[in-house]
Image (cartoon, helix red, strand yellow):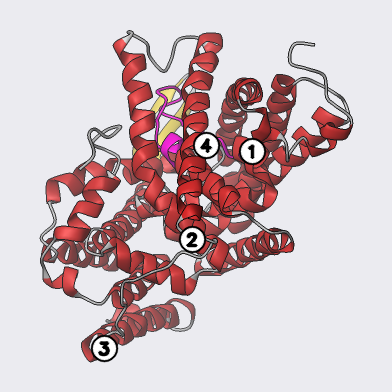
Amino acid sequence: MAHIHLEDGAFSPFWVIVWSLVAAGLVTLALIIIGRKETSPRKLAIAAMCTSVGFAVFQVSIPIFGGIHLNLTPLIGILAGPGLGSLAALLINVFSAAVGHGGWGMIGANTVVNVVEVAVSYYVYRLVRTRFKLDRFASGLGAAVVALSLSAVAIVAIVGISGIQDSEQTKEEIVANMVVIAVVNIAVGVLEGVVTGYVVSFIGRVRPDLLRDTEGVAEKDPAPAEGA
Amino acid sequence: MSRRSYSKHIPDFRLVTHYGESGRSVVHSANPWTKAVLLVAVVSLATVLTDIVLLTALFIVMLAAYKLARLPLGVLLGWFTLPVMFVVTLTMLFVFTEPGDEVVGLDLLGTRVSISDNGVILMAKLLLRALAVVTFSLTLFMTTKYGQIAGIAHRTLPRALATMFLLSYRFLFVTSDEVTDLLDAMHARNGGLVKGVTRQSRLFASIFGHAFIHAFERAERISKAMESRGFSGEFPTVERLPRPSARGYVMMAVAFAAVAFSAYCRYFDQELMRWL
């Protein structure tokens, strides 16, 4: 999972404002992307369902490394695209903050991290699937692992830049502490990548129409069939 | 209330909604705008305050607000597990590495491992901040009707975001039950969430894959039903949202005056806070 599980007050007011502004910029960009083309009620309903499933899955704690969870944002990115996927990521963070799963002030920083996951997974999946003609499992696995590894680095960067409020440690010491968490995140990212690969293959077999937009280029130049 | 929830440590949205819809208290009857603005003030105060005594006072005031709303304290204590777990997990390393006087320590393989006083204080402050905000956040959602939350979302968020927010809030109840059903089915077959990487991955994939497929099919059914009733992407809200009362404006002014004063003391005159 890639989520800054710091609660309110962990960042100083300055950095809360900075990351909130960055996130607001990204969400505005997502809204512009969505506004450019007609978004049908069906797409909105599917994106909302992605949000609620993402949030529900978010709450399932897996008892390894002291308790981790998957967040499936790469999968949401692949299914909903970078525009609606970014909005879904923001809403998952809002619902999570409401129940104490990360602070309200952390929504900005968390959204930046999750938008990275959504956008990177969407474009990597699309690239690998259409350009390199890999099957859905490999494309989903690759997209999720790349996205989650980058977001783990983004978490270390965000906490390293912002520092922890009231801590007397230097930024280098804070980064050293966060690297341990990033390593765990990347390890879980590989697991989530495998899960994402299986889920994308499963959806591709049962409901290939749900992947049509992401694999849009593949309609003209078909990607190899599953298992080919 | 939910048929089941994942655990008593995670807030159950159905229980939260039940209290929001049926509760009768001073806090329930307070204006939703006032409560939403006060949440912003509480988050700001938790971020700006650095004194552990003031943070403790903030937490106590939030607990008092929760109690004033006649909400169950035992449930809240169970739900504290989640924020406490996150704060402790992430600050555990800081407890050992934060510069300060040694509270307790031991020699391990020739290396001194110790807990510092500043590390403990850092963890305590983050806990107090987290719990103060979570308490008020839950108070807000457990005392405000869905229609009022929908009204606030409708008026403050862009159209696409508001529609997604309101739809996903409604879908949360069904998807939570869906995931819980799948977990129950797994446990019924003597399965567990940790059984080796290969089996684990396939297990998660089948759970989450089914959850997504069912969710999509349900979303499509719902969108068709909504479109057939004239839905065009705009979520209508029928709840009237009155303006805050004079007392509400006073409360908001006092809260933000406290935020401004705390920020002034922190950044311009730290002696003033010590003197107080």
Q: Name above or below for residue A102 compared with residue A140.
A: below
Q: Amino acid at mark 3?
A: Val
Could you classify mark 1 by the number of other residues whose Cα lies within 10 Å: few (under 14), some (14-19), or many (20 or more)?
Answer: many
Going by the numbered disc 4, the residue's amino acid type is Phe
Q: Could you tell which of marks 4 and 3 lies nearer the N-terminus?
A: 4
| Front disc: 2 or 1 | 2
- Marks 1/3 in contact by CB < 8 Å: the verdict is no
Label number found at residue B250 = 3
Task: Tell me which residue sits at (32%, 8%) in the image.
Answer: B190
Where is residue A3 drawn, in percent x and y? 53, 43
Nearer the observer: mark 4 or 3; the answer is 4
Label disc, if present, on residue B230 of the rendered structure: 2
Q: Which residue carries the number 1 mark?
A: A79
The chain containing the residue under callout 3 comes to: B
Q: Identify the image quadrant of the C terminus of chain A.
A: top right
> How packed is label 2: few (under 14 Cα within 10 Å), some, or many (20 or more)?
few
Q: Position of residue B155 (x, y in %)?
A: 45, 74
Q: Secondary structure at mark 3?
A: helix
Chain identity of mark 4? B
Q: Nearer the viewer, mark 1 or mark 4?
A: 4
**Element carrying mark 1:** helix
Label 1: chain? A
Q: What amino acid type should be assigned to the residue bearing mark 2?
A: Gly
Query: Residue at the location (32% across, 44% down)?
Result: B84
Task: Judge the density around disc 3: few (<14), some (14-19), many (≥20) Cα neighbours within 10 Å.
Answer: few
* Residue B94 in the image, given as x and y percentages of width and height: 46, 43
Q: Secondary structure at mark 4?
A: helix
Q: Write down the region rendered in magenta.
A: A55-74
